[in-house]
Amino acid sequence: MLGAVPDAPLRGREAEVDRLTSLIGHVMAGRCTLITIEGPPGCGKSRLLRESMLIAEGFGLRICAKSADGSHTAGGLPQRDPYNPHHPYAVAVDNAHHLDHEDVRTLIAHEAGPDGPARVWILARRPSAGAPPLEGMLLSPTAGTERIKLGPLRPSAAMALAGDALGAPPDAGLARILGRAGGHPRRLLELTQGMLEEGSIAVDGYRARLVTDRLPRRLVERVESSLMGYSPEFRQMVRVAAALGNEVSFDKVARVLNEPPTALLPTLDEVVAAGVLENNAGRLTFRDELLHRLITGWMPETVRDALRGQAFGAPESTCPALLTEPGGTGTDEPGATPYRGHLSDQEAVIAGLVHEGLTNRQIARRLGLSPHTVNYHLRKVFRKLGVASRVDLVRVVRGGTGGTSGATAALAPPA
């Protein structure tokens, strides 16, 4: 059933197909064009490249298809038609980020003279950190490159793709679980296939329904294997970021890694290019909830807690009163009371984020927890510190001398 997916309709890329059709059509008018299809691993570049070849064939172009990593090749560059040496052609190259200097020169220089035929190059590639040969050529002001950048699928297209794989559309409960893949085509399909194989999905008639919410082993192994192909620095940054939450500041990651931020910039470029994290003005966010959950699950809870304590428990943290050692003071004001000894590392982190003004839902997103878990820990913080409101808690974090006691201290903290 899932084996039919490659032949299924191309989902969610209608705008990209329209643009490819227009650009390839220009070749028939005598223009030469270089097109790149760009995106992180698993976003559907190869699938769209195959679609571009069908478009080119529809226009009557001669076709050459190859992969720059040597995994497959469909012949060399097209030979001239002896009856029409000026007949246009198309060259489609998968994994073009593996091209070396000589490959780039050969590819672009082929029949490049004024008497050569019109041609289109269509290159599927990952955005690369640094400046490999192809990147330098594409950045040339004379390259005339047309770039098609692939992002995640829209929810409706993602569920249609899952429906193609399952042979039936997912119901609301299953769609919610599959939505954790964030519209990433490969992870969505691997999640769908793995859950189906392990009995977590049942297909009843015309609907696919959720049986149990469990990460399939094949997906866990796939992501683990994929990340092992990257550098140790890459894996270290990703794991630290995952332990600190679905969203974390770059400076906190640098603090835990004990490296100046400038030294980590090459690794950050690599992580972003791989589609693991997004860098939004210094805030690092995992591309999707599923990926964050997978990476976090590799680490024992004690390791995650230690990393969080190191990040949020350093002197630079925003909760000084909570971070002093028992017997010390969290502020220079007379009478300030140290509360750090009363709270666990997790509770201290959550109290500090309340001080920053975050809601329970925002704290949950930052730490990779559920809002229910955050509320549970915050209730314990309220009881331990004898406060009845978030306002009182902020005063304590800032170095105030306490909150209230008695029944009011057991009030639930507002979300």
Image: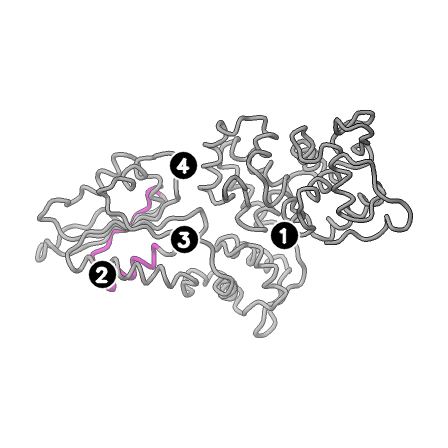
Label of residue 150 in the image: 3
Label of residue 125 in the image: none
Q: CA distance from mark 4 to mark 2?
A: 32 Å
Marked residue nearer the N-terminal end (1 or 2) = 2
Q: Which residue is mark 4?
A: 129
Q: Amino acid at mark 1?
A: Leu
Question: Answer yes or no: do the residues labelled 4 and 1 have beta carbons within 8 Å?
Answer: no
273 drawn magenta? no
Q: Which residues are magenta?
A: 49-70
Question: Answer yes or no: do the residues labelled 4 and 2 have beta carbons within 8 Å?
Answer: no
In-image side of 294 versus 185 (left or right): right
- Between tags 1 and 3, which lies in front? 3
Marked residue nearer the N-terminal end (4 or 2) = 2
Q: Which residue is mark 1?
A: 215
Question: Answer yes or no: do the residues labelled 2 and 3 have beta carbons within 8 Å?
Answer: no
Q: Amino acid at mark 3?
A: Leu
**Which quadrant of the structure image shows residue 327?**
top right
Q: Position of residue 349 (x, y in %)?
A: 71, 39
Please say if 337 is above or below 171.
above
- Assess disc 1: are there few (<14), some (14-19) or many (≥20) residues with their C-alpha within 10 Å of its C-alpha: some
Q: Amino acid at mark 2?
A: Gly
Q: CA distance from mark 1 to mark 2?
A: 44 Å
Q: Amino acid at mark 4?
A: Ala
Q: Which residue is mark 2?
A: 25
